[in-house]
Image (cartoon, helix red, strand yellow):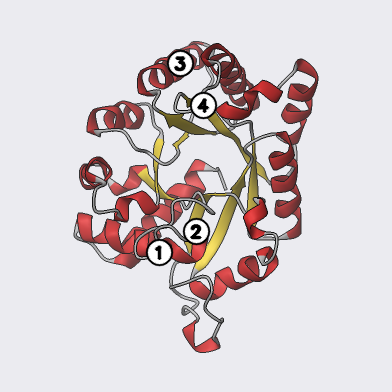
Amino acid sequence: MSENQNINENDRQPEERCLIFDTHAHYDDAQFDEDRDKILKSLSGYGIGNVVDVGAGLKSTARAVALAKEYPFVYAAAGVHPTETGELTEQNFSWLASQLDEKKVVAVGEIGLDYYWDCPHDTEQYWFRRQLLLAVEKDMPVIIHSRDAAADTLSIIQQAYGEAMEQGRRLTGVIHCFSYGRELAREYVKMGFFLGIGGVVTFRNARKTKEVVTETALKHLVLETDCPYLSPEPHRGERNSSLHLPFVVEEIARLKGMTAQEVIRVTTENARQLYRL
């Protein structure tokens, strides 16, 4: 289903069917400036129940929080993406922390490490740790971004997880757009993290992601878009939106030998557990 199709009352999902939960979107992105309201208001008619708009920086977080206030079915996450950590100071970090007290902010994210781009690794690691500690302090889940940084991401999370346990606290969350192999998937699941699965699973060459989905119990997976990025087949290369999530659902159902409705039901329950809704 294309996001550009006109909305037709006859296409609406029956009310008794479970609705999809998009756990990671960026509707605050400028790519949605021309039709953001139209798309968001159309989602329920196509079986999308809730969306978490995820902050990727200070300005992005402010926009995500504003969207959550405007739309009843939208929640927000507050965080600074690793490639944007150069903008963080102690002063604006305090502002970021204050956003976690907003009623509809449900997570710290997206945070993590990204070694693909030419950003100082020490800066990324410092603010990754700080945001993990903030999540533990606020008792909120984290949304983890990790690209070309598998070993360091796992090491830092394991350390923060262990420290939280020693303090009688917890560190929970989701590894967004999980792109590593089965061994790393097992390590994160062992700590109680969910794995975020989006459009990549539909790509023909996404062998590792397909293997992870096949092997990992559905109770550990959540659906996401990362829109406007990573649109699934057959819309690869187009602007992504939550309207494309049924293609992800169908591929997961195929890989796991179950119905699409069962995939939707379980992953929506998982999303609500992840974000404590």
Of 67 and 260, the residue lying toward us: 67
Q: Are marks 2 and 1 in contact (CB under 8 Å)?
A: yes
* Mark 1 or 3, nearer chain start: 3
Q: Are marks 3 and 2 in contact (CB under 8 Å)?
A: no
How far, Cα to Cα, is label 2 from label 1? 8 Å
Answer with the quarter of the image where residue 162 lies: top left
Q: Position of residue 238 (x, y in %)?
A: 47, 61
The residue that appears at 39% across and 61% down in the rendered structure is 264
Q: Are marks 2 and 4 in contact (CB under 8 Å)?
A: no
Of 213 and 83, the residue lying toward us: 83
Q: Position of residue 242 (x, y in %)?
A: 51, 61
How far, Cα to Cα, is label 3 from label 4? 9 Å
Q: From the viewer's perspective, is residue 245 above or below residue 147?
A: below
Q: Kindly identify the amino acid type of the residue bearing the numbered disc 3.
A: Ile
Residue pointed to by mark 2: 240
Q: Kindly identify the amino acid type of the residue bearing the numbered disc 2.
A: Asn
* Mark 2 or 1, nearer chain start: 1
